[in-house]
Amino acid sequence: MRLAIDTATDIASVAAGAGDRVATRSIRGARQQSMQIVALVQDVLTLAGVKLGQITEIVVSDGPGSFTGLRIGWAAAKGLAHEREIPLVAVPSLLGAAHAAAGDERGPVAACYDALRGQVFGAIYAFPDGRPETLVAPGLFTLAELARVTPVRPVVAVGDGAARYADEIVSWIGRPPLPLDAVPSIARSLLALASYDSARRPLADGMSAEPVYGRPAEAQAKWEARHGRPLPHSSR
């Protein structure tokens, strides 16, 4: 019985359950996440008909994505895991988005989150026989760069980054991208993906672990530029 939390984008989702018995809820708006994420977890557990004590593993989106969003989701996941001594694992957020968008497609699927500055956090995945396969690992790209390093043309593109550069996506794959609100709950996909060793990152020390942000926060980048050295205890 797993609980999954995804807060890598403006749409946060939580899912709980096992197999086909999964309950999920979502909220939109970055400002809502810090105020409502714990209540969202409680709502989903109630919908699933389970108590927190029955959860055997917590799955959290690993990033890349929104710096603030990831911190909120990870703080909630760490708190719950520490309180109940529940194992904590991370699954790449872009993999969750690609899985949610794939549907019956085997892939390839391009998942792109908006990284601002003309770039996206992008990755390419395929799902032969339902198994996740990484074709291009998550990284920071322009869409032109992502297209150049992709070995095959995707059949689907998803994410707020793909939606922001929709014209480029159409020129690349021949069809419009899927916005995040058009795909099923990403937290639900995280639950399914956590069953695959190739998708999960076990966090031996969940309290000190950090997500893969994709790039430093703006404040961190300015501090490092001013001081000429990495910020102490940064997650580079």
Image: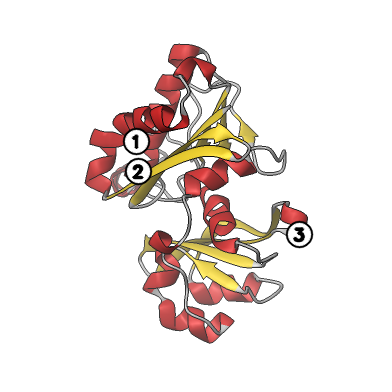
C-beta proximity under 8 Å, tags 2 and 1: yes
Q: Residue 72 carries which label?
A: 1
Q: Mark 2 points at which residue?
A: 69
Q: Which residue is drawn at 46% across and 50% down?
A: 185
Q: What residue type is labelled 1?
A: Ile
Secondary structure beneath disc 2?
helix
In three-dimensional space, the C-alpha distance between marks 1 and 3, rounded to whole angstroms, equals 33 Å
Nearer to me, 85 or 211: 85
Instruction: Tell me the colour scheme of the image.
Output: secondary structure
In three-dimensional space, the C-alpha distance between marks 2 and 1, rounded to whole angstroms, equals 5 Å
Nearer to me, 147 or 185: 185
Q: What residue type is labelled 2?
A: Gly
Q: Residue at x 63, y 44 (%)?
A: 193
Quarter location, residue 231: top left
Locate residue 230, reporting x and y percent: 42, 39
Q: Residues within 10 Å of mark 3 (few under 14, many from 20)?
A: few
Locate residue 189, reporting x and y percent: 56, 47
229 sits left or right of 59 in the view: left
Q: In which quarter of the image is the N terminus?
A: top right
Q: Mark 3 points at which residue?
A: 128
Q: Residue at x 52, y 44 (%)?
A: 188
Secondary structure beneath disc 1?
helix
In three-dimensional space, the C-alpha distance between marks 3 and 2, rounded to whole angstroms, equals 31 Å
Locate residue 93, reporting x and y percent: 51, 48
